[in-house]
């Protein structure tokens, strides 16, 4: 019997195997997919970056910094290619120490620690492929290193800032650091525009670091600046200033030459200067641009504002009669004096200005009143920034009339209780010269990407204009009428021909101006000095069609009479004469022979400005600096972060920082007096004349005052910003100190919880605040002693 064949079970087994294999491949494929996603999607950016680091090298290409041109397209600051030296430490091998020693003997100087042998060797040991030896060396140093032919030492071209005229207009141009960053002047103010945009070079390399190719993005050069400065006029101003500085043995000096019809600055000379090409020997004390960042008391030059405002708003005429009361005028217990040689009675307004009568100027201001006088001062540009394209410009000091004392208007009339800059002063004179319109000062003509040689960039040679531009710039405004301007020009011409400014007379040209002499702080005695003065002169020429305005300020002359008419007026005459001849301005007066000129100079001169005791109101002056905005360079806190530290010595100008530094040097007790004491030393000299004129504080007086102060220090504390905090919750009445000796005054003040600032010697004569005034405990009372 045949049996049916037996069926096999292979089909189910094969199906299971197939499923298993299929599942395996599915999972394997999924794992690979996940891994690929992880690598190519999630980690894509990371791997691209790693590949770029391994296969590519990127180098930054420095841009060429913009050029600074004068108005005639003469280069004042430019960028040149120089050699920098570097080494490849791997190639030096075991000779690193000896190579560093050899190179340091050639490239190192005592002012640059970067090129010292220890620093150089440390760089060699810290890197294998690259280390700087010295950057931007001069041609002689580069040649000496090349002649050594050292293995592993190479040269690379780099940009270096170069100033073809060395110290010409140094404070205006500024300077740059090693990294090509502007650190002063226009270089700092326009650093972003002039620096340019760096380029890049990207190279591809193989595993052995062989270059396979490269891609470049070219650097964008910085903007070029065309200035209103004329290099020739700048040189004339600096030469005249340097000669007078040497003759008068002065501390500092400033000369500003301006076009009165446009406000353009033609020259801004400051002495002493520095050479920006030689940063190794820079003196930090001369880096500051005194023309815009430092203030001084204008003194009698400010009488031009007083008389112009009186003529314009009070109906005063040059031929009107003013009673100068024989040189003495009393108001609210304060007596204003003229110079001892100028004791006039009833004279014309013009005569009073020509002979710089303080009483005459005060009476002009009284005709205006506080608010109107203040409005004219502001309109002339004082108490605010001019907007000139230079860094660290200060507003100066000008209080609101609400804070004026009862006799502050007398002080303002003769240039006291106010701080101005030389640029503000010359702009005020230009306003009178051009017909009465304030034109904001400018030092920049244009910013352009064009370079010298491009037909689109043309020089803008200065040609004196006889009228204002048809379209006035922003900030320009009328201050006085054209008629008032004409009268003031005529009166100012009389100052040169008949008054205190005879040494400002020119040969072949008419000139007009005003002298000024102001006292400054003496950091040795910590009081205002009758021997340390600031002499100034501000004027214009020719009178009928002014071509230029010039302001000259000389700080602390030590030879001769040291007054503005003797010290600064001759500088004005020399600069104005040379500039007018250089510009080809036609003569408006007959030329004089040398003998005639000598006769004019040796004629009897009129006495210059009064330095008599014209004590101004003290009480409203203490907060002048504190009231300025925080960004003003006169504020010490703002200066600390914005400017280099400047040493304060006995030649420093009257700035907040200098006065504060001197107070700290004097003694801890004086420094503890805080901002009020500092501000007292910042006030214009004549502000404290009532308390300063009789004699300087005796050593005993100073010692007694300092010994008494610590007893009441808990009532006075210093804020973080330098201000003074007193215990306002506890008020005491100011006792009367009149007739008391210094010891008696100190004891009475100590018993009342008050401090004393003694001035002079002898018995107590005057004090501020007045007896009976309720003040917070710890308030400082100023007491003048006299014999």
Image (cartoon, grey):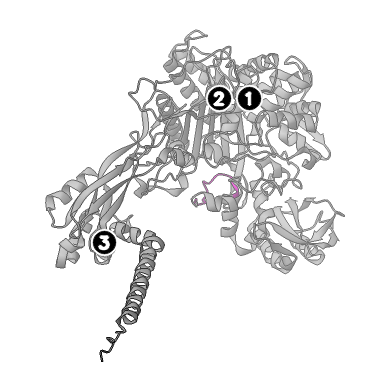
Q: Does residue 391 appear to the left or right of 199 in the view shown?
A: right
Please indicate, yes or no, whether residue 327 appears anywhere in the rendered image.
Answer: no
On the image, the x and y values in percent for residue 103 come to: 20, 57
Please indicate, yes or no, whether residue 254 appears anywhere in the rendered image.
Answer: yes
**Crowding at label 1, few (<14), some or many (≥20) Cα neighbours within 10 Å?**
some
Foreground: 216 or 70?
A: 216
Examine the image and state in which quarter residue 91 appears.
bottom left
Q: Residue 263 carries which label?
A: 2
222 lies above or below 126: above
Examine the image and state in which quarter residue 87 appears.
bottom left
Disc 1 on helix, strand or loop?
Answer: loop
Front of the two marks 1 and 2? 1
92 lies above or below 383: below
Predominant secondary structure in magenta? loop
Mark 2 → mark 3, Cα distance in angstroms: 51 Å
The mark nearer the N terminus, 2 or 3, is 3
670 lies above or below 75: below
Front of the two marks 2 and 3? 3
On the image, the x and y values in percent for residue 218 come to: 32, 40
Is the C-beta separation of discs 1 and 2 under 8 Å? yes
Q: Does residue 69 appear to the left or right of 531 in the view shown?
A: left
Foreground: 467 or 398?
A: 467
């Amino acid at each position: 019997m045949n049996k049916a064949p037996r069926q096999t079970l292979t089909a189910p087994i094969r199906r299971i195997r197939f499923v298993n294999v299929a599942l395996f491949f599915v999972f394997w494929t999924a794992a690979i997919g996940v891994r690929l996603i992880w690598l190519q999607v999630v980690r894509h950016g990371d791997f691209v970056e790693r590949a770029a680091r391994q296969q590519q090298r990127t180098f930054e290409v420095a841009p060429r910094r913009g050029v600074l041109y004068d108005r005639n397209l003469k280069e004042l600051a430019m960028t040149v290619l120089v050699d920098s030296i570097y080494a490849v430490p791997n190639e030096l091998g075991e000779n690193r120490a000896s190579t560093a020693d050899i190179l340091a003997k050639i490239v190192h100087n005592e002012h640059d620690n970067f090129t010292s042998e220890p620093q150089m060797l440390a760089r060699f040991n810290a890197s294998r492929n690259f280390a700087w030896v010295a950057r931007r060396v001069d041609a002689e140093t580069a040649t000496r290193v090349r002649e050594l032919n050292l293995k592993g030492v190479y040269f690379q071209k780099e940009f270096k800032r170069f100033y073809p005229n060395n110290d010409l207009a140094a404070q205006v141009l500024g300077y740059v650091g090693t990294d090509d960053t502007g650190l002063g002047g226009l270089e700092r103010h326009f650093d972003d525009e002039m620096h340019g945009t760096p380029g890049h070079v990207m190279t591809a390399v193989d595993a052995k670091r062989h270059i396979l190719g490269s891609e470049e993005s070219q650097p964008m050069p910085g903007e070029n600046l065309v200035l209103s400065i004329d290099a020739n006029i700048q040189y004339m101003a600096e030469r005249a200033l340097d000669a007078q500085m040497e003759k008068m043995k002065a501390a500092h000096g400033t000369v500003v030459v301006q076009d009165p019809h446009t406000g353009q600055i033609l020259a801004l000379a400051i002495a002493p200067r520095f050479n920006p090409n030689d940063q190794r020997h820079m003196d930090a004390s001369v880096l500051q641009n005194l023309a815009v960042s430092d203030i001084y008391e204008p003194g009698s030059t400010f009488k031009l504002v007083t008389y112009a405002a009186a003529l314009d708003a009070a109906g005063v005429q040059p031929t009107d009669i003013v009673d100068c009361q024989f040189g003495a005028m009393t108001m609210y217990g304060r007596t204003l004096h003229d110079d001892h040689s100028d004791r006039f009675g009833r004279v014309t307004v013009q005569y009073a200005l020509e002979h710089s009568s303080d009483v005459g100027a005060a009476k002009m201001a009284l005709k205006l009143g506080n608010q109107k006088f203040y409005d004219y001062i502001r309109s002339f540009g004082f108490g605010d920034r001019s907007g000139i394209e230079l860094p660290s410009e200060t507003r100066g000091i000008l209080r609101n009339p609400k804070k004026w004392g009862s006799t502050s208007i007398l002080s303002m009339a003769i240039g006291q209780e106010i701080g101005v800059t030389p640029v503000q002063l010359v702009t005020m004179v230009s306003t009178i010269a051009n017909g009465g319109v304030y034109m904001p000062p400018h030092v920049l003509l244009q910013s352009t990407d064009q370079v010298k040689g491009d037909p689109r960039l043309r020089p803008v040679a200065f040609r004196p204009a006889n009228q204002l531009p048809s379209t006035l710039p922003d900030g320009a405004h009328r201050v006085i009428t054209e008629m008032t301007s004409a009268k003031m020009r005529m009166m100012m011409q009389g100052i040169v021909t008949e008054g205190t400014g005879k040494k400002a007379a020119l040969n072949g040209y008419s000139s007009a101006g005003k002298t000024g002499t102001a006292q400054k702080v003496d950091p040795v005695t910590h009081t205002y000095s009758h021997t340390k003065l600031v002499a100034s002169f501000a004027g214009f020429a020719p009178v009928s069609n002014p071509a230029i305005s010039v302001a000259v300020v000389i700080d602390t002359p030590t030879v001769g009479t040291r007054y503005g008419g003797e010290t600064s007026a001759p500088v004005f005459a020399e600069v104005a004469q040379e500039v007018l001849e250089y510009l080809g301005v036609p003569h408006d007066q007959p030329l004089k022979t040398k003998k005639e000129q000598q006769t004019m100079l040796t004629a009897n001169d009129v006495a210059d400005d009064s330095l008599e005791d014209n004590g101004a109101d003290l009480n409203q002056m203490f907060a002048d600096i504190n009231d300025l905005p925080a960004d003003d360079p006169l504020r010490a806190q703002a200066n600390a972060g914005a400017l280099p530290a400047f040493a304060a010595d006995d030649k420093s100008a009257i700035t907040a920082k200098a006065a504060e530094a001197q107070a700290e040097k004097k003694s801890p007790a004086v420094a503890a007096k805080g901002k009020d004491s500092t501000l007292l030393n910042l006030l214009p000299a004549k502000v404290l004349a009532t308390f300063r004129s009789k004699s300087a504080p005796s050593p005993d007086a100073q010692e007694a005052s300092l010994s008494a102060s610590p007893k009441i220090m808990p009532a006075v504390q210093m804020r973080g910003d330098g201000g003074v905090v007193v215990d306002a919750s506890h008020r005491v009445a100011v006792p009367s100190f009149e007739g008391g000796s210094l010891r008696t005054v100190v004891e009475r003040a100590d018993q009342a919880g008050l401090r004393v600032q003694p001035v002079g010697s002898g018995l107590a004569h005057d004090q501020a605040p007045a007896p009976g005034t309720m003040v917070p405990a710890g308030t400082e009372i100023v007491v003048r002693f006299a014999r």
